[in-house]
Image (cartoon, rainbow, N blue to C red):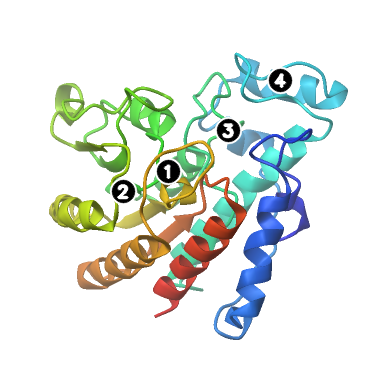
Amino acid sequence: MGETIARYGFPDGHPFGADRHDAFVRQFEARGLGARVRVAAPVPAEPDELLLFHTPLYVDLVRERSATGQGFLDGGDTPAFRGVYEAAASVVGATLVAARALMAGDAQRAFVPIAGLHHAARDRAAGFCVFNDIGVAIEVLRREHGLMRIAYVDIDAHHGDGVFYAYEADPQLAFADIHEEGRTLYPGTGAADETGKGAAAGAKLNIPVPAGADDATFAAVWPRVLGFIEASDPQFIILQCGADSVAGDPITHLAFTPAAHGRAARDLAALADRLGHGRVLALGGGGYNRANLAMAWNDVVEGLAG
């Protein structure tokens, strides 16, 4: 949490507004969670860290448009604003602070609101996501800490395409994603037959569910995710827990409750404990109904805190 990542939000009534962070913090404080967890300050990611995942030309483009605040960083969903480079780099940095704390043994679980920007590709922004903190974290875990078997679980209503296609041919990145089926929702990817390419065939699990899918649907498909992830024997688990899969989101059509998010966090924490390392990094992701994200993300924090 912190003012620097709170700045990652788009102006002029954009669904991804900067007030999302404060909505989470108000509920966090109301539940008294500050007494149960340690709050760490984010540190902006360095350019060389961003370049572990993103291309130099793209990082330069973000920096240039950040200075002027003019134009878009993609085809029209992700506008530039003054300071967008610094705000986006702070989100990546917050994710790296959390990942490194887990690797140092300073914590077993961590949650970062606003982070989990799963649409950004290596060379472009997409879907409100400027820098892909998930991809940068995967590269840091591998290069700095020697971890290869990493699991990524995504319960955001939107398919995590920026992560999926970056690692589609990587057999050691286990990918499991429950999302609203692409015929009705951006980005239109993540069909059930997208299971990885080449040596990674079978290393990816996409579970599209229909509009209106509720907690009963989640309960029916979630054991598949847990079994799939456990079979990959990951050394580190990342959960993207976007709250736009909760009923009442203004731009999606699923009907989960925050309890599904809390269950995902608890179950993955228990799985990580069974695997012997305990490491789960949860990232807030999407969610455009402020009450929903406040409830779902704090259920995740409680689930991770036990």
- Mark 4 and mark 1 lie on one chain; the one further toward the N terminus is 4
Q: Residues within 10 Å of mark 2 (few under 14, many from 20)?
A: many
**At 64% from the left edge and 40% from the top edge, which residue is drawn?**
16
Q: Earlier in the sequence, mark 3 or mark 4?
A: 4
Q: Tell me the mark number nearer the camera, choosing from 3 and 4.
A: 3
**Mark 2 and mark 1 residues within 8 Å of each other at the beta carbon:** yes
> Height in image: 15 above or below 23?
above
Quarter holding the C terminus?
bottom left
Q: Counting residues from the N terminus, which is met first, the one under dot 4 or under dot 2?
A: 4
| Disc 3, SS | loop
Residue found 49% across the figure and 24% down from its top: 121
Label 1 SS: helix
Q: Secondary structure at mark 4?
A: helix
Query: Which is in the foreground here, disc 3 or disc 1?
Result: 3
Q: Position of residue 149 (x, y in %)?
A: 27, 48
How crowded is the residue under tag 1: few (<14 C-alpha within 10 Å), some, or many (20+)? Answer: many
Amino acid at the residue labelled 4 = Asp
Q: Which mark is residue 129?
A: 3
Give the mark nearest the N terminus, 3 or 2: 3
Residue matched to label 2: 150
Question: How far is mark 3 from mark 2, CA to CA?
Answer: 22 Å
Q: Secondary structure at mark 2?
A: strand
Instruction: State how far apart marks 4 and 2 are (Cα).
Output: 29 Å
CA–CA distance between discs 2 and 1?
7 Å
In the figure, residue 123 lies in which quadrant?
top right
Query: What is the three-letter code of the residue carrying label 1?
Result: Ile
- Residue type at mark 3: give it: Cys
Question: Which quadrant would the N terminus be assigned to in this image?
Answer: bottom right
Which of the numbered marks, if any, corresponds to residue 60?
4
